Image: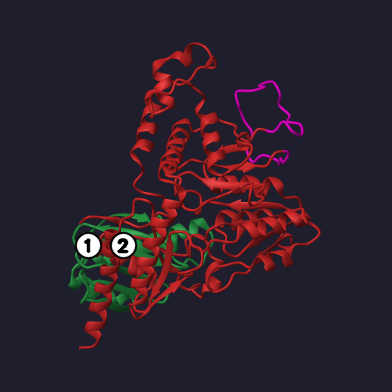
Chain colours: A green, B red
Amino acid sequence: MKIIRTEESRESCSEPELIAFDIFLDQPVDENLIKKLSVFGSLTYLSMLKEPFFKVEGDDIFIKGLQGDQLIRYAYTENSGEISSKERNFKNRIDYLKDFLEKM
Amino acid sequence: MKKIYLNNSATSYPKPDRVKASYVKYLDAVPPSQFRSSLNMSSKDFQSSLSVEGGKREVEDILVRTRRSLGLFFNCSDSGKIHFTSGATESLNAIIGGLYKEGNHFVSTVTEHNSVLRPLFNLCSPRDFTLVPCDREGYVSPAAVKRSIRKETKAIIVNHASNVTGSIQDVAAIGRIAREAEVLFIVDASQSAGCIPVDIDRNFIDILAFTGHKSLMGVPGTGGFYLRNSLSFRPLKFGGTGQRSKMLLYSEGEIDYEPGTPNYPGIAALNEGIAFLNNIGIDAIQEKEGKLRRRLWDSLTDIPGIELYGSKNRPAAPVVSFTYINLAPSDLANILYGSYGIIGRAGFHCSPEIHKALETYSTGTMRISFSWFTTEEEIDGLISAVRDIDFRIKGFRSL
């Protein structure tokens, strides 16, 4: 699985105190991926919903979305106010997620 | 999947046909010349650009016509004092920044949008403004406003209708208080203009900020403010106005608040939005939207685990905020959109302080907001979706 593109969420204030990005994938999210994402934190998997919803919550991140979608939202707390470190922080996190997905 | 748009507090959708037609017609028409009183005034293209109603012989500048439409709509005796901006945020920044001098004091409320809060927090000294609290339903007591007035108070700034709870503040009472105390009364009508009556003269409003793209049915990038005669403040922007070009330094009383090229297509569209609302009548709009609000409120109340914010029976704009015990608002919004095609809005709605009173400061709320075009079927679609989500989650947990 590959990340096609990432975009900062336009209305990230819906995710309190977090910086949120929308990540577009080349394939739909399936149950296998959702379960593997749980390495990032504790998994809430609402499989009973019309489209199963998942949310993985770590210490300072979450990843969430709907099974079957090609979009996931990735959000994290930003401790540093410096732009350069903000960008570096984001790049490191996305690179890590990208490697993780590509190994799937 | 058919989309259901219930985020009209952010921007109204759909727009009336006449609004869209006016915007396009204005873009298609030859722009007016400086000599608009002679050749261009008789130009067929220009005439048709000014009105989509047709048959109107009198041709006027679209800015003049729209100011007059707005003046009548807001019941102000001098529509010449309506100034166009890009929206309420620009208006409120101009007003607060222009009026503030260190030592001047503003009284405002915790129900304000960030278009008031951020100018106050960033342009003014913290000791120079007081935020009056609201009750658990988002209403501000006029008596509390009165108690916050000091001898150095310059103005009272009040959000007419909350974009979080819909709560409509008692601007008539607060206006009287301001008049008696001889302080300016500034009203943010972003959420009220076009869905409930806004009466400048009757409510002693000295300055009114409005946006064009919400219930006034115009397009984004339009709005303005009304400034009572004899008032003035330091402008936010300076630039070309097409008038008195050699005068570089403004003196008192010669201030122009509309530098730069006006948003003519947007203003023409706003004029048609006002005409659309006038044809329906503000009372009919209020009645229809109030009925939809009560329908949603009653249905959500029946779902255990849903908590509503605001009031069902006190005056309210067409907004309902709620939380659901089993899902964070942003997760609920995610599911409603992804699985049911319903577009609402989750979070703080750029109005953080009111959430302290509502006790939703950690998660925000899920907000649903309507317009004249919202149907009962769309509201029922939302209710059915929330019930379905609740049924599935509770059914699964009871297994």
Q: Which residue is mark 2?
A: B379
Question: Which is the main secondary structure of the residues drawn in magenta?
Answer: loop
Viewer-closest of B218 and B301: B301
The residue depicted at 33 percent of the width and 77 percent of the height is B303
- Residue A98 visible in this rendered orientation of the protein: no
Magenta-drawn stretch contains B246: yes
Expressed as whole percent of the image width and height from the top left, the position of residue A49 reads 22, 73
- Say if B329 sits above or below B226 in the image: below
- The quadrant of the picture occupied by the N terminus of chain B is bottom left
Expressed as whole percent of the image width and height from the top left, the position of residue B249 reads 73, 29
Residue stretch rendered in magenta on the structure: B230-255
- Say if B240 sits above or below B117 in the image: above
Instruction: Look at the numbered disc 2 and give the secondary structure of its residue.
Output: helix
Viewer-closest of B110 and B289: B289
The residue depicted at 60 percent of the width and 38 percent of the height is B82
Q: Residue furthest bottom?
A: B399
> What is the total number of numbered labels drawn onto the structure image?
2
Q: Are tags 2 and 1 found on a single chain?
A: no
Question: Which of the two marks, 2 or 1, is nearer to us in this view?
Answer: 2
Q: Which residue is mark 1?
A: A69
Q: Amino acid at mark 1?
A: Asp
Give the alpha-carbon distance from disc 2 to disc 1, as whole Å: 26 Å
Q: Amino acid at mark 2?
A: Ile
Expressed as whole percent of the image width and height from the top left, the position of residue A101 reads 24, 65
Instruction: Rate crowding at label 1 as few (under 14), some (14 to 19) or many (20 or more) other CA atoms within 10 Å.
Output: some
